[in-house]
Amino acid sequence: MTLVPLPAFADNYIWMLHDGSNAIVVDPGDAQPVFDALARHKLQLAAILVTHHHADHTGGVAALHAATGAPVWGPASERIPEPFTPMSQGDTAEIEVLGLRFQVIDVPGHTAGHIAYFLPTTAAQAPLLFCGDTLFSGGCGRLFEGTPAQMLASLDALAALPGDTRVCCAHEYTLANLRFARAVEPGNDDLTHYNARCESLRAQGQPTLPSQLATERQINPFLRSREATVLRAVRAHAELSADAGEADVFAALRQWKNDFR
């Protein structure tokens, strides 16, 4: 299977996974990049996976379904263009398409019903995670509908996946996120090296994604909110009391990022 990020809008990626004949796309906010890729690679669209209801992730769903008949899967508790098969973690926790079995993970926080799709290791490839706007390289999504406690639990669930998991985020936010991460942990050598690599990729016009989960555990402050270095920085910045809980620390970290310039 070949993994392809299709740029859309200013900084979105629509992820395409194909076997040379048939394709799966994730979060097609715009139909045209998908139509162009299908034509360019002579592919048939076999499935559309949606992580959450925001228009930059769903705007192309109706046109793609109408043109190709490809079935659509999406979060059970969110409004996704019909017809679609509602999915949530639990009884309906797997999708099988093109011989691949995707596991569905509930990751509320960015939106109330956000889900992620995880493809475990196969003989030919490392695991894949399509995480929408929950986890970004060096960052996480804004909390539009969920709570800090929900987002922290969602990120914990993703962080527990295998370290070689390829993290397919839906936006090219990496350099901006790393600028904030370096303000939180200026002494993190792993972060310094990763930032240099990502700057080099962007200078060459290349995406920084997919990232790798093991790397994110080393450099992403939102996966490291319990680490002593991050705790000290957040408590100092937000003037939190020593008895502030984990969700309070995470909320202060997210607010710091919201205000960061």
Image (spheres, rainbow, N blue to C red):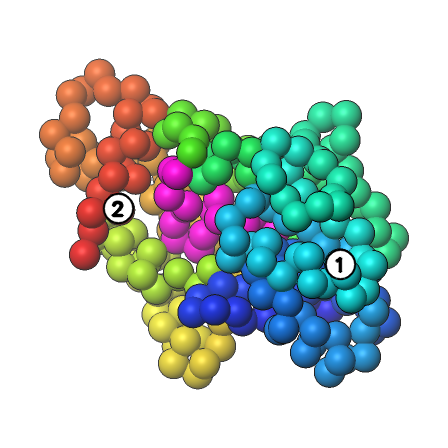
Residue 133 appears left or right of 95 = left
**Toward the viewer: 15 or 158?**
15
Considering the numbered disc 1 on the image, is that residue within a helix, a strand or a loop? helix
* Up/down of 207 relative to 224, above or below: below
Which residue position holds label 1?
65
Residue 2: x and y in percent read 73, 68
Residue 13 appears left or right of 45 = left
Residue 186: x and y in percent read 22, 53
Q: Residue at x 72, y 63 (%)?
A: 64
Which residue position holds label 2?
258
Type of amino acid at the residue the image marks with label 2: Asn
- The reply to whether the C-beta atoms of the residues labelled 2 and 1 are less than 8 Å apart is no
**Toward the viewer: 116 or 1?**
116
* Up/down of 196 relative to 88, above or below: below
User: Residue 229 falls in which quadrant of the image?
Assistant: top left
User: Residue 246 falls in which quadrant of the image?
Assistant: top left
Residue 6 appears left or right of 190 = right
* Up/down of 165 relative to 145, above or below: below
Mark sitting on residue 191: none
Q: Residue at x 55, y 38 (%)?
A: 114
Image quarter where the N terminus lies is: bottom right
Q: Is residue 126 visible?
A: no
Q: Mark 2 and mark 1: span between their CA atoms?
A: 36 Å
Residue 138, magenta (yes or no): yes
Considering the numbered disc 2 on the image, is that residue within a helix, a strand or a loop? helix
Type of amino acid at the residue the image marks with label 1: His
* Up/down of 77 relative to 41, above or below: above
Q: Residue at x 74, y 75 (%)?
A: 38
Q: Write down the region rendered in magenta.
A: 130-144
